[in-house]
Amino acid sequence: MIKKLLFSAMICAVCANAEVVNGVIAVVDNEPITNYELVKVQKLTGASPQAAMEILIGQKLQQSEIKRRGIAANDAEVDARLKAIAEQNKLSFDQLKTAVESQGINYADFRENVRRTLLEEKLYNSIFADIQRKTTPENVKKFYTQNSSLFTTFDSITLTRYIAKSQAPLDKIRANPKLRPSDVYVMKGTLKANQMDEGLKYIVTNVEQGKFSPIIPTRNGYEMFYVNDKKGLRTLDFDSVQDRAIEGYVTSERKKAVAEFNDRLRSNANIRIIERPQAQPQSGKDKDKAKVQKRN
């Protein structure tokens, strides 16, 4: 009899945990978001629960709009994009799969993320159609004038580099630069512009003194840079950076278009956040204690 009771209790505990793991925590236009999805996004991105929830809400809104417009990406398109990713990294198809899985990412999930990217690109192509018409010499020159800090060069730069396994501690440092989490590796140094890697130079050139760079995903985690100082700082003339100015203008306009589009989707959507219990399910004894305390 005791064994049966213990077995029943174990089954109940498993079911209770399953409800917590798979429980619906939000609904976006009748599309559920589960706690499992939230944990999955946190694992993939290193984001906080709040940031992961925003990512999922955005994804659900986009998926709903993609369905409404009848946009699709077939397996041949996904395979072609995966082949392009492999070739860019000088890998074979099988090597790409091995590289993805070696980073703790399920290959099927990676493939679905590629499919989602293709669908989003098709969705946004219609939004970006008007940007090409707006990319005139006058608008590009205006962008250059209003964003002159993006078109500077320097002789040397002092940087603080932050490296972490996940994005969350770097987000905390951005919010409070005085923080020094134990799980973040920090190093500071001065580099001459003519000795810098072109990729790093491109990133920090666009960051003003006293500001952080965007958080950058790497093979082993995440990193970002803080610009302490720039020596010999000067603005480049428009003719020498015209191509960069065009690229900057188009990128800026695309970001604005995406933000406005997503705001419209969100304002017209039915989003319901379901409050879920934070504590783990209580044992029988704990429940009895809670009841006694409640009566008092």
Image (cartoon, helix red, strand yellow):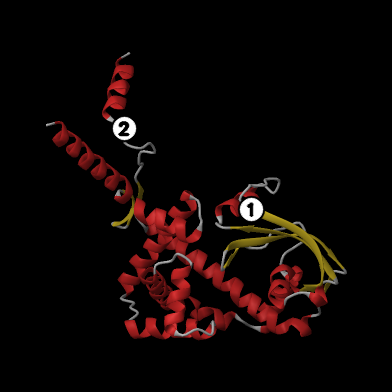
Q: Is residue 215 visible?
A: no
For marks 1 and 2, give the CA distance: 35 Å
User: What type is the residue that disc 1 sits on?
Assistant: Val
Q: Quadrant of residue 179?
A: top right
- x and y, in percent, of residue 232 in the image: 88, 69
Q: Which residue is farthest left?
A: 1
Compared to residue 173, the image places residue 145 above or below, namely below
- x and y, in percent, of residue 162 in the image: 67, 58
Residue at 37%, 62% (x, y): give it.
60
Query: Observer-nearest residue: 182 or 204?
Result: 182
- x and y, in percent, of residue 103 in the image: 48, 67
**Element type at mark 2:** loop
**Element type at mark 1:** strand
Left/right of residue 67 with respect to residue 153 in the rendered view: left
**Dot 2, how many residues are within 10 Å of its Cα: few (below 14), some (14-19), or many (20+)?**
few
Left/right of residue 89 with respect to residue 114 in the rendered view: right
- x and y, in percent, of residue 18 in the image: 28, 47
Compared to residue 16, the image places residue 123 above or below, namely below
Q: Quadrant of the N terminus?
A: top left
Compared to residue 40, the image places residue 278 above or below, namely above
Q: Quadrant of the C terminus?
A: top left
User: What type is the residue that disc 2 sits on?
Assistant: Gln
Q: Residue 184, which numbered label?
A: 1
Q: Which residue is farthest top?
A: 296
Q: Residue 282, which numbered label?
A: 2
